[in-house]
Amino acid sequence: MTLRFVLNGAPVTVGPDRPGAGLDPHVTLLQWLRASGKTGSKEGCAEGECGACAVAFVGADAEGRARFEPVNSCLVPLWTVNGRNVVTVEGIAGPGGELHPVQEAMVQRGGSQCGYCTPGFVVSLFCEYYRPGRAGYDPESISGNLCRCTGYRPIADVARALPYPPADDPWLATLGEPPLPPAAVDSYDSPGPARFERPLTLTRAFECLAECPGAVLMAGGTDLMVYANQRYERWPMLIALDGIAELGRYEETPGEIVIGAGVALSQIEERLAAKHHGELASLEALLPLFSSRLIRNRATLGGGLATASPIGDSAPVLLVLDASVTIASAAGSRRVALSEFFLDYRKTVLGSGDVIVSVHLPRPTPRWQRFYKVSKRVMDDISTVAGAFALDRDSDGKVERLRVAYGGIAATPLRARAVERMAVGRPWTGETIALLARVLEGVGTPMSDHRGSGAYRRAVAGKLLERFFFETSEGPRAAEVRP
Ligand SMILES: Cc1cc2nc3c(=O)[nH]c(=O)nc-3n(C[C@H](O)[C@H](O)[C@H](O)COP(=O)(O)OP(=O)(O)OC[C@H]3O[C@@H](n4cnc5c(N)ncnc54)[C@H](O)[C@@H]3O)c2cc1C
Ligand code: FES
Ligand code: FES
């Protein structure tokens, strides 16, 4: 098996008769780049936090048009790039070494001191420079890149003053072509026992799972590859899911919205911004708070749910939207309500041959929805407590249905069913909320850790419920809800 991809405009082959043949499947794109002499991309953290390793993939937007997507190359196994078009910081300048406008701006505005973070910022800004529909400064464009030296202002100034590409910009030609489709990876020559597979069908994925006990599925790899890099975990087979069409599906019917388990979060974000106008307001509120654009270009809902992290952000939102998931295995497929999906700490109903195919959100969605994330930093941080709320009221203003879900107050993401039951039929008033807050005190088992004490978490859970009430009862902010 030979791995082929396009790197900075030139075809690259890694295979049995080429240098790099038989690479271990856990080797990341960043490790390979640096070992091949492309040392522009840096390793700062190897866990998706600093952005020093950023490279651009030529990906597709929600309409299938090519676009540059910054990703953390430290979290991408090399074999994932089979069939892809990749641009690293070395490829951004012109053929004669002329600086790209973003590089020129970084020089002019003093955006670099020690320079360690600079290639990552340049790649992120390069992708932003070509982002379709860009209108002015978007802090998100550099939110996944950290710098120790400059104090950020000169770099933010570059982002604020980004010009727009002229019509004869050569990179626009790359974006004018359809993005390369993902290519299968099938049993390549590996030096050790480990294998990497990128099946293009679910059937082939099930075969791989059956062939290799201990094989792991990988969607975006933003969780899995942290374990590979930081804890040196190794698996006998990595099965990349990003070539399987069913997992990339996005569909709307009158009865539901179906999001493929493998759709990147940034694509979901784009679709919601373009279409829904608040129908999935809680999901819309969550996505910008989910790490950085670099991570969201790879991370998926399926991966987030399968980790069953008690502080994962997507579960509380999906729980209040009454989501269910389709799970498939060689034996067939089944639909499971998300409220039945989490069994215990990091345990779900998924068996070893199961793949989450899609997430289903019933319509009509709740009229009032909110998601709140409490973390030490507003952007790019892990939740201490996350709360999601959804409410429908009857014509008298009484509670018809309330959904309350939290991350960070129990061993699993949790629906506060006792609170939900107590609310039904009551007026949406301060007295009702005071009653619900007392019921909430008996829900969950918040623990203490470096992010917050159990008592703090419990207090925050109650305050988020109050906040939801204040934002959805009479008053100026109540007007922000979906009409
Ligand atoms: C820097 C950084 C910041 C982060 N910030 C956040 C944050 O703000 N909020 C948050 O909630 N999380 C965050 N995460 C965690 C991670 O990004 C999420 O859990 C993400 O949703 C994982 O998705 P993925 O596609 O990358 O999963 P992967 O890493 O590919 O997989 C994760 C697990 O799910 C399994 N899996 C993947 N897809 C499927 C499937 N379709 N069926 C069955 N099993 C599957 C894999 O086998 C693996 O065990 C962060 C991670 C990093 C590195
Ligand atoms: S090395 Fe820090 S994000 Fe990749
Ligand atoms: S210039 Fe030194 S880390 Fe950014």
Image (cartoon, rainbow, N blue to C red):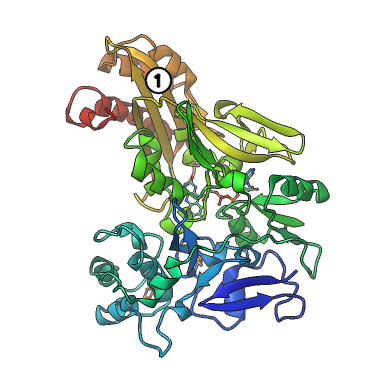
Residue at horizontal 50 percent and vertical 65 percent from the top? 57
Q: Looking at the picture, does residue 256 appear above or below residue 48?
A: above
Number of numbered discs present?
A: 1
Residue at horizontal 24 percent and vertical 66 percent from the top? 160
Q: Which kind of residue does numbered mark 1 sit on?
A: Leu
> Can residue 187 be seen from the camera position used here?
yes
Residue that badge 1 annotates: 402
Query: Closest to the observer: 193 or 265?
Result: 265
Give the crowd class for mark 1: few <14, some 14-19, many >=20 residues within 10 Å: many
Residue at horizontal 69 percent and vertical 49 percent from the top? 201
- Look at the image and tell me in which quarter the N terminus lies: bottom right
Residue at horizontal 45 percent and vertical 29 percent from the top? 321
Q: Is residue 121 left or right of residue 477?
A: right
- Look at the image and tell me in which quarter the C terminus lies: top left
Quarter of the rendering containing residue 459: top left
Residue at the extreme left: 476
Q: What percent of the width, then of the height, locates residue 209?
A: 76, 47
Classify mark 1: helix, strand or loop: strand
Q: What percent of the width, then of the height, locates residue 229?
A: 61, 63
Query: Closest to the observer: 281 or 194?
Result: 281
Q: Looking at the picture, does residue 122 appear above or below residue 217?
A: below
